[in-house]
Each structure stands twice: as C-alpha cells, then as structure tokens.
Amino acid sequence: MAITTTSYKNFINGEWAESTSKEVYEVTNPANEDEIVGKFPLSTEEDVNHAVQSAHKAFTEWRKVPASERAAYIYRFIELLDQNKERLGEVLCKEQGKPLKEAVTEVTRGVSEMRFVAGEAVRLDGTTLPSDRRGVLNMAVRVPIGVVAAITPWNFPVLTPLRKVIPALVCGCTAVLKPATETPLTSVIITELLEEAGLPKGTVNLVIGKGRKVGDALVGHELVKGVSFTGSTQVGRNIYETAAKTFTKVQLELGGNNPAVVADFNDLESAATQIVGGCYSNAGQRCTAIGRVIVLDKHADELEKHIVEKVKEYKVGPGMDAETKVGPVVNEGARSTLLEYMETAKDEGAHILLGGRSVTGGEYDKGHYFEPTVISGVTPDMKVAQEEIFGPVLIIIRVSSLDEAIEVSNNTEYGLTASVFTDNMEFGYRFMEDVDSGMIHINNGTISEGHMPFGGVKNSGVGPYSIGGTNKDFYTELKVTYIQHQ
Ligand code: NAD
C-alpha cells in the first residue's frame, strides 16, 4: 500500500494556502530518515508580501481591541494548547528529535509562560509625571509597533514561536511567523490552534520556507516594524544590517557558549549532576546549554570522574523511546560538524575522555546519533573552547585561581548565561559582578523561569530581553502627550 505524505500550507489572511511557487520540500524524522514528517511549501517573496499586507490590514483593527479582550483570545488559545500538549509533544519529538518527555515539557512550559504573557495585556503601563506648568497633564503611553516578523530556530520549535507571536498579539501587534525550515509542523499546529481560538483574520500569518528567501524578504519589508529573531549570531548579524536600512526595531536572541565555574565547592557530585543536566538535554542543542566547565585544579580530577560517571548513564536513542535521555542531533550536517570538532580538538592537543563518535549500527543507522562527549585538557584558546558547538559535548578547562576562572569565563564572543558552583559567597558575588553575561546562576544549573527577562550581552543578543516584563519594550513604543486641561 502506498504511504501518502501529508502536505501542509501557509496561513495568510485567515486562509490556508499553497505557496505561489507550488514547490514543496520534505521534513524527515532525525531519529529515522525513512519517516517523512510532511511536505511543506517553499514560499516566495510574493507569499511574504501577501502575509505582511494582511497583517498590516488586520493591525488597523486589532490595535483598537481592548487589551483585556486581546488577552481573552489568548486565554482561549492557551486552553487549546494545554488540551493538545501530548499531540504537539509527539509531533515535536518526531520533527526535531528531542526525547518525548522533554518535548511535552516544552509545551507545558509554553502553557504556563503564555498565561503570564496574556496577563501582561492589562499591565502595559506607561508613565505620568508632574508637569512644569499649571493645568497640564504629562503622560507617556504604550502603543503597539505594528506588524512583527517572528523568525525562529529549530531547537525549541514550540516555545520560541509562542514567545514571539503571543506577546506580539497581547501588545496589539499582528504577526508573520517564519518557523525554522527543519521544524515547520509544530508551527502549523500552533497556528491551527490560534485559528480555532478565533483570532481575527490576518492577525497571525504563517509563511514556511527557506531563511534566505522568506526571512530576508520579511526583514526587508517596509511594513514590518519589528523583527524578533532567535537563531545563530551570523544570521542575526545579517538581519541587523538589513533592518538598519529601514530603521526596523530588532530583538535578536543569538548564540551562547556558556561557562559553569566550579570553585571552592564541597559537593562536587551535585555540581556534576547539574552540569550534566545543563549540558545534554535536547542533545546539547540549547542556546543556554552548559558547554564549558571551568574548574579549579584542586577539584578537577574528582569533578571529571563524577561527570564521566553521570554521562555514562545517558542513553542515546530515538526520542519516542522512554529510556532515551539523548536523542539524535537535528540533521546530518549537525553530526558532521560535531565530528569535525572532535578532529580539531584532538589536533589541538585536547583529550576525549568519553564519546566523540557517531552512534551507528542497526536502527541507529537510520538517524543522526552522536555519543554524549566529554573533552578534557582543553585550553581557553582552542576552537572547542571558543565556539558554540551546539551538540552533546562538554569541555573541561582547568584553572589555578578564582581570577583566572573569571577571565576564562569571559574569554568568548558570547555572553548569554553563566553558572558558578561555589560555597564561597564572596566569590559568588564577584562572579555575578564581573562575568559578562545576560543571565547568571549561582549554585543552580542554567534553568530560567518564564516570568523573568531572558537575554544575552556581547554577541549573544541585541534589543529588549524577551520573556517576562521586558518584552513589552520591544512590542510597543511610547507616545508622549501633554494635555492642557485648565
Ligand atoms: P539559524 O540562524 O540558522 O536559523 C534561525 C532562523 O533564521 C530560521 O528560521 C532560518 O530559516 C532563518 N534564517 C536563515 N537565514 C536567514 C536570513 N538570511 N534572513 C532571515 N532569516 C534567516 O539558527 P538555527 O540553526 O535554527 O538555531 C540554532 C542557533 O540558534 C544557535 O546559535 C543557538 O544558540 C541559537 N539560539 C539562541 C537562543 C537565544 O535565546 N539566545 C535560543 C535558541 C537558539
């Protein structure tokens, strides 16, 4: 019997539509290349233009809908999201590869975060200040910026689109979502749920396709007033350049190369547990993954031993298998990049303590599996210490002093998140002050919370932090008004 593959469409002006190109591409399961997840449109500039025009038209009405009514649409959507968490989690697991449990957790995290975001609708506060003049009222009120382009990566294909589209709608903007080419199906389902929640036509649009074509056209479109992008630093730089030409506002959330310092810490086993958890979830493909352990010489042997013991317990396999702790990496390109890093690390004199190879044989041959890897004997200037590896790889750098630990932590172009495990709170505070990082964790992995600002410094990000209360600084702008009332 012939297996039919489902074809999916764009969503523009409240209608599901094929691309004007009529061309499609296939997405396959990273755990099993024989399994086709679906066929998706390769959209064109014309599709982008239709989507932006429809979002622009819808904006004229949506901006006037009272904030609490906008929130009511979103609360309806959140209920639907909650009801669909198992289904969406399964699709996410098959499309992107992460273990099912992590996938469902991503959706439930989305549900709880979006409740906070919906509540923000009635907290879009401005400012009033006393006037210098009698009988004058001075105020600054927030207004939505207009059409927002949401461009998302493949590593959190449920959470990242939600984190952009939902605050845009809550703040009174309309949105065009361009999901990662690798993971469009989760965005199709999210869009279906928004449609079911009754969002007026044109408020949310979905255009699927390649970054260069769809992404470029969106960022350069004169009616797009804000670009919220999460992805690599390189693509972020291109977007920043293009957006500058039209003075389009940006919120760029980029790469990371996150240190975990272990210094004057008694419970090395618990530090190892948190570091390993912070490194290998989502097969290390997290912007906030711990990638570099920076450890004082005196702790290093024992810490390495604990880390290796714990990583050995991480079973590699398909995300749908309940035993799996580390799923496949997203595609073959990602796996070959990891193999290249291994060769470079060895050439530069580092020592692969554990892993370092593809996992092959039997069912593994169908997917893109890579062993959870620990590399020791790394020095701060080696390529594996400098670059964002974005895979299940942890490197260990030994240092001889607290000063050196901070210096090495900062010795990277990135500044997203940084952790320290220490019983020496004086050092903990110093770390907080001297580390160039948007987010800092003292004695606590890298877990962020859904109502706290999230973002990075240096080459890890530009623009208002997303998540939490700071998001409104991106999706709104101020109107300052003086009223003579006497
Ligand atoms: P990517 O930069 O390759 O792609 C991200 C998105 O941009 C995709 O939708 C892609 O199609 C699109 N795109 C590609 N070229 C474009 C162009 N010229 N114009 C406009 N859009 C374009 O990133 P990725 O491989 O999908 O994701 C991994 C990267 O994302 C890592 O560097 C990771 O650290 C980063 N990331 C950062 C955060 C954060 O919050 N800081 C969160 C998750 C992921």
Image: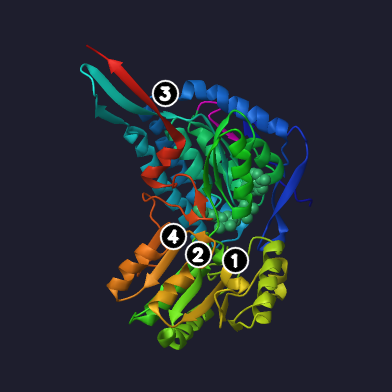
Q: Are marks 2 and 4 in contact (CB under 8 Å)?
A: no
Q: Which residue ends up furthest to the top in the rendered image? A: 486
Q: Which residue is mark 4?
A: 437
Q: Secondary structure at mark 3?
A: loop
Q: Secondary structure at mark 4?
A: loop
Locate residue 448, reporting x and y percent.
40, 57
First-in-chain label (2 vs 4): 2
At label 2, counting other C-alpha atoms closer than 10 Å, the crowd grade (few under 14, some 14-19, many 20 or more) is: many
Residue 255 at least partly seen: yes
Q: Amino acid at mark 1?
A: Glu
First-in-chain label (3 vs 4): 3
At label 1, counting other C-alpha atoms closer than 10 Å, the crowd grade (few under 14, some 14-19, many 20 or more) is: some
Q: Amino acid at mark 4?
A: Ser
- Indicate whether residue 201 is drawn in magenta: yes
Tell me the distance, in whole angstroms, between the alpha carbons under discs 3 and 4. Answer: 38 Å
Which of 428/65 is in front?
A: 428
Q: Residue at x 69, y 32 (%)?
A: 47
Q: Residue at x 26, y 21 (%)?
A: 137
Range covered by the magenta-colored residues = 200-206
Query: Which quadrant is home to the C terminus?
Result: top left
Which of 147/138 is in front?
A: 138
Q: Amino acid at mark 3?
A: Val
